[in-house]
Image (spheres, rainbow, N blue to C red):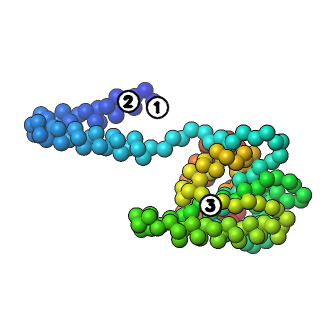
Amino acid sequence: MAPWKLPVIVAAIAVPIVAAFWLGGGGVGVAVGALGAVAVVVVAARAKPLGPIASAETDSDGRHVLLVITCAVEEPAAVRQIAAASGLGGGDRAGVLVLSPARIGFLDRWASDVEGARHVAQQNLVATVAALAKAGIAAEARVGDEDVVQAVEDQLQSFPASEVVLVSEQGEKDEASVRAELESRLQPEFHHVVLGGG
C-alpha cells in the first residue's frame, strides 16, 4: 500500500465521526461511529487476497494441464484449438484435469439452490471430456466454485498443474477480468482460448 493511503483512510473514518459528535451530539456520533465500524468489517470481509496462485508440488516430471471451461467444448475445431494452445495431443502423456465452475444465478444463490448450476457444469464436463477423448486426449473432470479464479485456486491446492488453460466463449461475461487476474496471479504457465473468436 502506498504510504499516503493509510492517513487518508484513517481520516475518512475519523472525520465523519468527529463531525457527527460535534454537530449532532453523543447519540449521533455513536451511531455514525457504529456505521463506520460496520463498513470497515464489511470491506475487510469482502476483500480478496491477491497473492500469487501456486500449484501443488509434484514428484513426477510429467506435464499436468488444468483445463478450465466456462462452456461445453464439443466441436472438433474447438478441441484442435485447445490442443494447439496447450500442446496436447500427438501422443503426449500429460495429465489433464477439466474444471467447470458451477455458475450460480443471483436468485438461486439466495435460495441456496445450487443443484441446477452443478448439473449444467456436469453436462459441460461430460461433453468436453467426450470430445477430448475422441481426439485422443484422456482427461479427468471436476466441478468447481462459481468464481472461476477461486475454482482454479482451489483446484491447484491438490492438482500439480504445470499449465492452466482457460477456455471461454467470445463476449462472455467477466471474460476479460478473469483472464487478467489469472494472468497476473498464476505461477504455472497460462493460456487463454476464446471459442468463436481469435
Q: Which type of secondary structure does the marked residue at label 1 adopt?
A: loop
User: Badge 1 local density, few (<14 within 10 Å), some, or many (20+)?
Assistant: few
Q: Which mark is residue 143?
A: 3
Left or right: residue 112 compared with residue 84: left
| Residue 28 higher or lower than 84, as above or below | above
Residue 21 percent coordinates (x, y): 14, 35
Residue 131 percent coordinates (x, y): 77, 70
Q: Which type of secondary structure does the marked residue at label 3 adopt?
A: strand
Left or right: residue 139 compared with residue 23: right
At x 11%, y 40%, the residue is 27
Where does label 2 land, which residue?
A: 6
Q: Amino acid at mark 1?
A: Met
Mark 1 vs mark 2: which is more N-terminal?
1
Front label number (3 vs 2): 3
Left or right: residue 99 compared with residue 86: left
| Residue 185 higher or lower than 139, as above or below | above
Q: Which mark is residue 1?
A: 1
Residue 121 percent coordinates (x, y): 61, 67
At x 16%, y 38%, the residue is 29
Question: Marks 2 and 1: in contact by CB < 8 Å?
Answer: yes
